[in-house]
Amino acid sequence: MMDKQMPEKIVQVTDRARNRAVAVRDEEPDGEGLVLFLEITEGNGFEYGYDLFFDDEGAIRDGDVVQDEDGLKVVIPASSVHNLRGATLDLSKNLLNPGWVVDNPNRPTPSPAVGGGQRIDPSQFEGSVEERVAQVLEAVVNPAIASHGGRANLIAVEDGTVFVQLSGGCQGCGMASVTLTQGIEVTLKEAVPEIQRVVDTTDHASGTNPYFQPAKK
């Protein structure tokens, strides 16, 4: 008798990432019934953007890949399977702020239209570094995260570092670091070459947003 073949693993999940996800899940009411979704969003045309959120098992659709990571179910939506194949979900090595990191060998096919039809081209933004950062946040970043009720507010720009404060659906969200590092920071670096990093100044402890996003309708 042949052994039953195990389902293909699309994304590698490190122990650190799994343990952190389980800790976040268990803080939620009925956490045991939640599964972790990892999917690709539009990104900025140079790198994929990612959405990481918890939902109940009823949100799983035909064609989605479900990975069992030692009691944590990780769901890769069908539309993201191909472009997430070979990726790794991990935590950054910053011990003071261990944000989520998706290391993906795949890249988007170059396209002139990103961010709702706008091309991420540094020459389209004018003014000082701070003015250009503000323009990118309003024209590209905020329309993208508005789908989750979120918003990124510019606090300051100092020596190549952008300080932002997340509000709305992003405040208090355990997955906000994905939005910051895999979305906002990548976009700002491409659009404003002087930018070296983005720092989140949000007081997430006072946020009322749950640590998972509701199912997409």
Image (tube, helix red, strand yellow):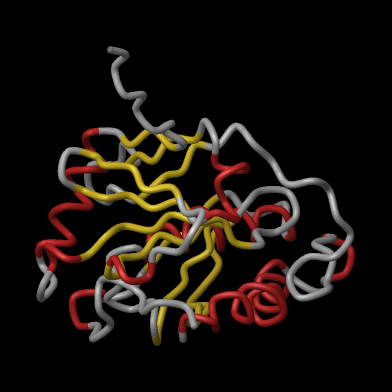
Please tell me which residue lies in front, 8 or 16: 8
Q: In x, y percent, where is residue 73? A: 26, 50
Image quadrant where residue 61 sits: bottom left
**Residue 159 visible, this angle:** no
Instruction: Name the quarter where the N terminus is drawn.
Output: top left
Please tell me which residue lies in front, 189 or 67: 67
Looking at the image, is 17 positioned above or below residue 161?
above
Looking at the image, is 47 positioned above or below residue 118?
above
Q: In x, y percent, where is residue 26? A: 10, 62
Image quadrant where residue 121 sits: bottom right
Horizontal side of 9 relative to 98 (left or right) equals right
Please tell me which residue lies in front, 86 or 78: 78
Horizontal side of 199 relative to 14 (left or right) equals right
Horizontal side of 32 relative to 105 (left or right) equals left
Q: In x, y percent, where is residue 176? A: 37, 66
Please tell me which residue lies in front, 130 or 46: 46
The residue at the far top in this view is 1
The residue at the far front in this view is 1
Q: Looking at the image, which residue is at 51% across and 73% down?
A: 156
Q: Looking at the image, which residue is at 33% across and 37% down?
A: 13
Q: Looking at the image, which residue is at 72% across and 52% down?
A: 193
**Residue 191 visible, this angle:** yes
Q: In x, y percent, where is residue 195? A: 63, 54
